[in-house]
């Protein structure tokens, strides 16, 4: 039953992203050319909601679906990992025209070529899992 709830929430999130045009290649193109505030506003509002949510989880004794306490570990401070990871993420986003969230929405909206993007993301994640111990963390 929990899995069905998560699937329905994912579908609802996809519909919201589609209707808000955040899964539109043209909106992403406008963002990278600084021609529209639309995507910056969406990302900024998501950042604010995330900050509030994480602070709420840290201050309250929140639990997950199974009743286990949610414990958010502090991140390691490392310039190399965030710089290299951010560059790789940004280049992939700019080349494909979408970040990982909207690629599923684009596939669901009938843009079948994003199936190749999803497959490539899965292959890249697999190879990261193989070499992650050799990378600067």
Image (spheres, rainbow, N blue to C red):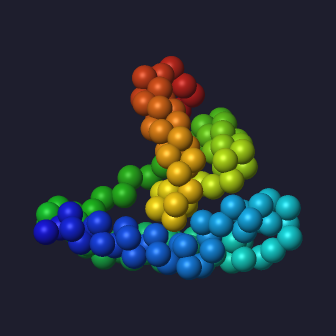
- Quarter of the image for residue 40 reads bottom right
Counting labels gives 0
- Residue that appears at 53% across and 73% down: 17
Quadrant (top left, top right, bottom left, bottom right) of the N terminus: bottom left
**Relative to residue 37, is residue 75 depicted above or below?**
above
- Quarter of the image for residue 67 reads bottom left
**Relative to residue 87, is residue 4 depicted above or below?**
below
- Residue that appears at 85% across and 61% down: 33
User: Can residue 44 be seen by looking at this rendering?
Assistant: no
Comparing 116 with 56, the one in front is 116
In the shown orientation, is residue 9 left or right of residue 43? left
Image coordinates of residue 105 in percent, x first then y, are 50, 63
In the shown orientation, is residue 40 left or right of residue 127? right
In the shown orientation, is residue 55 left or right of residue 102? left
Image coordinates of residue 42 in percent, x first then y, are 63, 75
Comparing 135 with 75, the one in front is 135
- Residue that appears at 39% across and 76% down: 12
Image coordinates of residue 64 in percent, x first then y, are 22, 66
**Relative to residue 116, is residue 21 depicted above or below?**
below
User: Can residue 24 be seen by looking at this rendering?
Assistant: yes
Image coordinates of residue 57 in percent, x first then y, are 35, 71
- Residue that appears at 81% across and 74% down: 36
In the shown orientation, is residue 32 left or right of residue 6? right
Comparing 106 with 72, the one in front is 106
Comparing 55 with 127, the one in front is 127
**Relative to residue 60, is residue 3 depicted above or below?**
above
């Amino acid at each position: 039953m929990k899995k069905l709830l998560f699937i329905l929430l994912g579908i609802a999130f996809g519909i919201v992203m589609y209707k808000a045009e955040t899964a539109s290649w043209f909106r992403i193109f406008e963002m990278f050319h600084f021609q529209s505030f639309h995507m910056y506003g969406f990302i900024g509002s998501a950042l604010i909601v995330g900050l509030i949510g994480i602070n709420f989880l840290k201050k309250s004794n929140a639990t997950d679906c199974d009743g286990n306490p949610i414990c958010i570990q502090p991140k390691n401070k490392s310039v190399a990992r965030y710089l290299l990871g951010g560059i790789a993420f940004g280049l992939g986003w700019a080349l494909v025209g979408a970040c990982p969230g909207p690629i599923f929405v684009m596939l669901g909206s009938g843009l079948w070529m994003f199936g190749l993007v999803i497959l490539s993301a899965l292959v890249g994640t697999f190879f990261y899992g193989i070499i992650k111990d050799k990378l600067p963390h």
